[in-house]
Image (cartoon, helix red, strand yellow):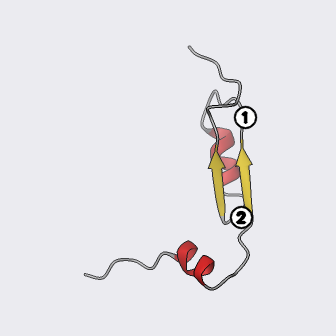
Amino acid sequence: MQTPINSFKRAIAEHHPQIAQWLGLGLTDHYTAEICAGAGFDWVLIAGEHSPSKTY
């Protein structure tokens, strides 16, 4: 069985620009992350350490 081709690593190796989003919201639910994941960006970084957040 062959491993799947990683299209992100291939694009980086071929010097294609990658468009990204930095998601630093205080996520109280998963909806915001899912919307951003489906928005067409090549990758999304979810930064939870330096963002406001609620603890339930």
Quarter of the view holding residue 44: bottom right
Q: Quadrant of the C terminus?
A: top right
What residue lies at 58% left-to-right and 16% top-to-bottom? 55
The image shows residue 46 at horizontal and vertical percentages of 63, 44
Q: Nearer the viewer, mark 2 or mark 1?
A: 1
Q: Secondary structure at mark 2?
A: loop
Instruction: Name the residue furthest bottom.
Output: 14
The image shows residue 16 at horizontal and vertical percentages of 70, 81
Q: Secondary structure at mark 1?
A: loop
Above or below residue 3? Residue 24 is: above
Quarter of the view holding residue 49: top right
The local crowd at label 2, few if under 14, some if 14 to 19, many if 20 or more residues have their Cα within 10 Å, is few
Asked whether 33 or 53 is in front, the reply is 53
**Which mark is drawn over residue 25?**
1
N-terminal of the pair, mark 2 or mark 1, is 1
Left or right of 53: which side holds 4? left
**Which mark is drawn over residue 40?**
2
The local crowd at label 1, few if under 14, some if 14 to 19, many if 20 or more residues have their Cα within 10 Å, is some
What residue lies at 68% left-to-right and 82% top-to-bottom? 15
**Which mark is drawn over residue 56?**
none
Above or below residue 31? Residue 2 is: below
Q: Amino acid at mark 2?
A: Gly
Q: CA distance from mark 2 to mark 1?
A: 19 Å
Label 2 with label 1: CB-CB less than 8 Å: no
What residue lies at 34% left-to-right and 77% top-to-bottom? 3
Q: Quadrant of the N terminus?
A: bottom left
The image shows residue 51 at horizontal and vertical percentages of 70, 30
Asked whether 11 or 29 is in front, the reply is 11
Count numbered badges in the picture.
2
The image shows residue 4 at horizontal and vertical percentages of 40, 77
Q: Amino acid at mark 1?
A: Leu
